[in-house]
Image: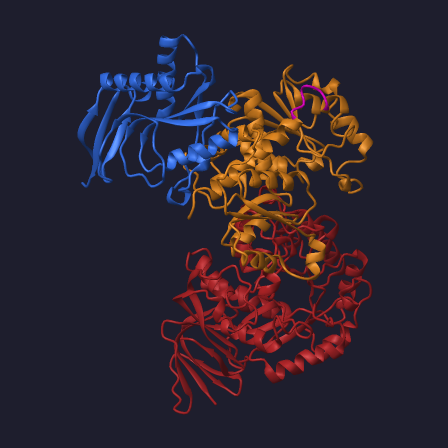
Chain colours: A orange, B blue, C red
Amino acid sequence: MAFNHKHLLGIKDLNKEDILTILDTAESFREISIREIKKVPTLRGKTIINLFYEPSTRTRSSFEIAAKRLSADIINFNSSVSSVAKGETLKDTVLNLEAMRPDAIIIRHPASGAPYFLTTFCKSSVINAGDGTHEHPTQALLDALTIRQMKGDFSKLKVVIAGDILHSRVAKSNIFLLTKMGAKVVLSGPPPLVPPEFKEFGVEIDYNFDNALKDADVVMMLRIQRERQGKNFFPSLREYRNLYSLTPEKMKNAKKDAIIMHPGPINRGIELSTDLADSSKSVILKQVENGIAVRMAILYLLLGGGGK
Amino acid sequence: MTEKIKAKIMDARKIKRALNRITMEILERNRDLDNVVIIGIRTRGIYLAQRIADIIKEIEKIEVPVGILDITLYRDDFSALHPQPVVKKTEINFPVENKDVVLVDDVLFTGRTVRAAMDSLIDLGRPKTIQLAVLIDRGHRELPIRADYVGKFLPTSRREIVKVHLKEIDGQDEVLITEPSEI
Amino acid sequence: MKILIKNGRVIDPSSGIDDTLDILIEKGKIVDIKAKIEDSQAKIIDATRLVVAPGFIDMHVHLREPGREDKETIETGSKAAAKGGFTTICCMPNTNPVNDNRGVTEYIISEAKRKAVVNVYPVAAISVGSAGKELTDMVDLRDAGAIAFSDDGEPVSDSNLMRRALEYSRLIDVPIIDHCEDKSLSQNGVMNEGFYSYLFGLTGIPPASEEIMVVRDLILAERTKAKLHIAHISTKGSVEFLKVAKEKGVRVSAEVTPHHLILTDSCLETYDTNLKVKPPLRSKSDVDALVDAMKNGLIDVIASDHAPHTEDEKNVEFDFAPFGINGLETAISLILDHFVNKGVISIQRCIELFSTNPASILGLKNKGKIQVGADADITILNLHKEIIVDKNKFQSKSKNTPFHGWRLRGAPVMTIVNGKIVWDER
């Protein structure tokens, strides 16, 4: 069960055993969040920096709460690339923050690979909280924890991921994770957003959403970015909704006990109907809850072991 | 490095006797048995706690709640350990607020585990009392901690290792003293 | 001063020479080539076990002057060329200001005369400001010294402008060099589109972005009968279309860079911005097709597309780094190591790609050959010398190479330009 990583950059870099270690550790941490006193002293004296170059409430506060429940000190540094582009480079910013001797830097950045760039000059642990269209490893891990709680053995599951696969780091990390764990993964969405080369990741593609959903155990809907509109990845929101919105009608194709997941924030009535989002099939809030445990586990595994 | 067994200190019978005595002392000191809860410290404390609860049930026909405490997150020696110890769940499905808590562990050594266990317990609520029961007290305390109930005082050298084996996980009940030996 | 190169293996593909010969150089010209030459006044260069080749020509470099002298100057770029084994370089017009008028062309030529250690020929812009709207005064620019025309860095997006440029170039019969890229397809892409762009989450540039423009240019070149040169060809599809056009007799030539022959898109897993280049590093099957085409003569020229950028500019997120690889000082060793010494191509073919062919495409009648009366531009190679690429020893002002630390076998060891030794590292 040894977890020998200094950074968490992507699911790509983890093996099956690493993933199970994280999930098992996260499972143990869930109990802390239901205590009266939701705090343990494990990371007392550790300093963590939340470095966010993109707006985010969910992920940033989830990391913040996770760090605080482990008694680490965490500070938020929010910036936009546009303001930084005018002045300080990412490297200079991070070198300045590093001079304050943090133990970990959690980074979200619109440029894919930015966390990898940090590791070329950083002494602290780097945790990827989402980079461009590349990876969002903690989201995939919290999704996996949720799936395992609800469905058990990954190898018996059919997971459908639908929507803007091309631009989704959540989809990417989930594809890497679920295929490593042996689940059958089927992608669906408009062809310009689901390139056929994705099959090389070991998944299937079915552009017909009804077919894709057949006998699914898990349906993961992705947020359709409104800014993709007008770029001809799909004709219009109306047409998108007609074809790829998950409705109770479409959901009938999936298994009776199938669960619905969404990384949030939801466009209600676009990729996911309100009825379903609020139905008992939806595990969306459970995902959020599991996010804390998974991020506590990551912080513990990266920082708890002492000098590396 | 391997270990060489130097002496067998207790066998199954001696362990049983020690636990009987500890249980009697617990009963004697805690007149209000309804207020008592027993919490075992992972890993071997769990089984000792359960055995004490079983003996109480035999004698008093009362089921005392038993919980499990994982103290990994409260350790003060993270930097000395590598890789990270595996975190397991704390399973205490009853309130500890105002209870007489009997903490159970196999060996009392430096006192650091018990310190972590008390910190952890206090984060779960405010017990009325915390009492400590151990099968072996081998000395060499680094903190001002002492046990309320001791199965056996065992003078040791720092170099020696005290090994408690319990049938539930080790197949048999015994207490051994071993010593690392170079090969 | 006279120079006598003795006992070298002289290889000149233009005349078919491959023999151990002595070469006597005087007043910038080759004056004698014989098995044994004695001359007590000449400086003797012992070229035993070395290959003596006609001076190598890099027809695609960016010298950044005027405008970005922090990245490179005509002087430093020419020193990098000399160290890299090149005797002649052609500099692209995407400077600031753009080389779209006689003033800039003359500036480059006069700066080169004063400071450059190798021959520098400016390539002038096809369109004013390389903005893709109006043609430059091509005849005037040619008269001022421009050797070819290109809007390199930018493609000629407007097909009609490309047509007119090709038609008009027939007046002077110099090559039109196009950087083939359909910008509506490449958009904000930063690497080759395909499995690896999805794996790394980087925006893709599809091979079609290049191929569409290659095909367009080939069609226009066929109709106009003008001389077309395709810069830095990078895809299997482009090679296939090039083959069809060449078979039809279109006056087209093409160049490939060492990095496109050696590196693939999978290399980008480190997000090393020194691998960010346009056209992007392509897939394994593209690279295989390029190597084949280089071998069988479909591709005429190897050019470095030397594109210096400062370390500060490259030391950023991948998306924000400029495109380009510093190439002059690694090109020849890379090709010797990967292709000549591995038996993929002969040394003769290598010299054709680096010297004979570029000289003929550019109409440099006294270059690219070792003959009596030719310019005394000589590149001397040691095919067995082992080098370790060290960017800190570059003559170039910039260090943006992905090859730092690579161990290579085969290297240029002496560069002679117009009868003068400008680099000696024997």
Q: Answer with the quarter of the image where residue B77 lies.
A: top left
On the question of residue A179 being in view, the answer is yes
Please state, as top left, top right, bottom left or bottom right, where the N terminus of chain A lies in the image.
top left
Image coordinates of residue B168 in percent, x first then y, are 33, 18
Q: Is A282 inside the magenta-drawn segment?
A: yes
In the image, residue B164 lies in the stretch drawn in magenta: no
Of residues A222 and B4, the one nearer the viewer is B4
Residue interval drawn in magenta: A278-283
Q: In the displayed structure, does residue C64 sit left or right of residue C55?
A: right
Type of secondary structure dominating the magenta stretch: loop
Q: Quadrant of residue B82?
A: top left
Residue C163: x and y in percent read 78, 59
Tell whether B93 sits left or right of C72: left
x and y, in percent, of residue C4 in the image: 42, 84
Identify the residue shown where x is 38% and y is 87%. Answer: C38
As rendered, which of B20 and C104 lies closer to the eye? B20
Q: Nearer the viewer, residue A105 or A114?
A: A105
Query: Considering only vertical position in the picture, is A34 above or below B85?
Result: above
Q: Is residue C297 visible?
A: no
